Image (tube, coloured by chain):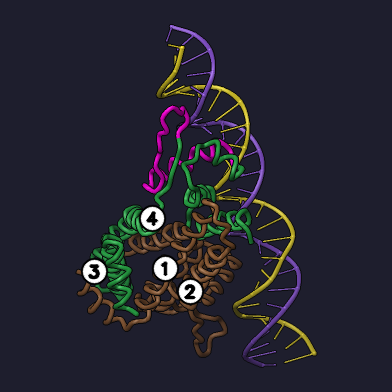
Chain colours: A brown, B green, C yellow, D purple
DNA sequence: ATAAACTTTCAATAATTACTGAAAGTTTAG
DNA sequence: CTAAACTTTCAGTAATTATTGAAAGTTTAT
């Protein structure tokens, strides 16, 4: 396998992984492309490399920026905007974990809490609903707390201390 | 909010959460329904409660069984098959984490390893590709190892020891 | 001010994914 | 063996989601 094949494989693998996890293909592929690029890329560059339309590129770049993992890079003397992604995987993982927590886990925790505090009429089915939603609520909170804790450590805390601990 | 409303809210919330994480709506809703049900349900029961077709119910039940989180329950004297889901959330989380690792993380680790070991021709772009896919490979392995370790502990190890540690 | 260079928006369309319902398949009772 | 009771499969269709491309919008240079 040489460079071009490897590059294509990387971009397409990342793209389908994204799909699997509820992130759209173009978005994942743009990020992948930037991730292995040695220099910032323009919209033009991205469109050409990935063979996608201008509109698609624009929309997904904006989403990536919104997620905090892609930034505009102004190149002096150039009219075009250039883009780079966070290159440090740990930092990247932090951003993604933080955002998914905020957008997805937190709202679910809120709803589970609401549901688990319905009036208890002492019927079996109500008791079961309360019990089970409470358990899920606790699990979600625990998982989210762990995620935050892990994600907010310095790179070395996690790779060194925790990894040592759980091995 | 009383029982019926709470139940519907729970099922639909779980359904849309599923969608967000790449699990289909019907599958998530069936699991949610079983999760708060006080007794095993038949295909008929599920179809009626969720207003979905027989085919859809059958397909998704099979998938849930395949994931190891729903089991058939034979009720003596009954011709129909009845279904229950794992009721312990910790156990449920273990199953799901284990399966997602096996189906999704492991294959990606394999591909990243392949890519990161392409022939290094010493050009800048090849060096960058190798460096970045290696980093991702390491991250994926670390995350996966942690997931496994966490997920394979007794319920109390995680909720007591680790939670105490990170608080 | 205006024109060129560039980006965003969005209605139309394409691609993907989920769902239905009926036919085919399977199991059990008698 | 046969019929009833039940489950699975799958072709057709519906619903959802992603993508295009051109018009509208914005910014910058002169």
The answer, for residue A147, to whether it is visible in the render is yes
Dot 1: what SS? Answer: helix
Dot 3: what SS? Answer: loop
For mark 3, what is the residue?
Answer: B120
Who is closer to the viewer here, C10 or C17? C17
Residues at marks 3 and 1, CA–CA distance in whole angstroms: 20 Å
Residues at marks 2 and 3 on the same chain: no
| N-term-proximal mark, 3 vs 4 | 4
Which-is-in-front pick, marks 3 and 1? 1
* Picture residue at 47% right of the left edge, 51% below the top: B35
* Picture residue at 55% right of the left edge, 81% below the top: A80
Who is closer to the viewer here, B131 or A111? A111
Give x and y (percent) for residue B149: 26, 64
B153 part of magenta stretch: no
Residues at marks 3 and 4, CA–CA distance in whole angstroms: 49 Å
Residues at marks 4 and 2 on the same chain: no
The answer for which chain carries disc 2 is A
For mark 2, what is the residue?
Answer: A99
């Amino acid at each position: 396998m040489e460079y071009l094949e490897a590059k294509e494989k990387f971009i397409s693998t990342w793209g389908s992984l994204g799909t699997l996890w509820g992130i759209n293909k173009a978005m994942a592929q743009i990020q992948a492309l930037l991730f292995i690029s040695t220099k910032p890329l323009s919209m033009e560059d991205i469109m050409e490399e990935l063979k996608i339309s201008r509109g698609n590129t624009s929309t997904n770049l904006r989403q990536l920026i919104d997620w905090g993992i892609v930034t505009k890079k102004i190149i002096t003397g150039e009219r075009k905007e250039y883009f780079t992604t966070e290159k440090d995987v740990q930092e990247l993982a932090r951003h993604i974990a933080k955002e998914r927590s905020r957008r997805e886990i937190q709202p679910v925790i809120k709803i589970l809490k609401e549901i688990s505090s319905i009036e208890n009429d002492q019927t079996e089915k109500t008791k079961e609903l309360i019990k089970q939603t409470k358990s899920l609520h606790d699990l979600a909170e625990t998982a989210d707390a762990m995620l935050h804790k892990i994600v907010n450590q310095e790179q070395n805390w996690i790779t060194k201390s925790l990894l040592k601990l759980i091995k």
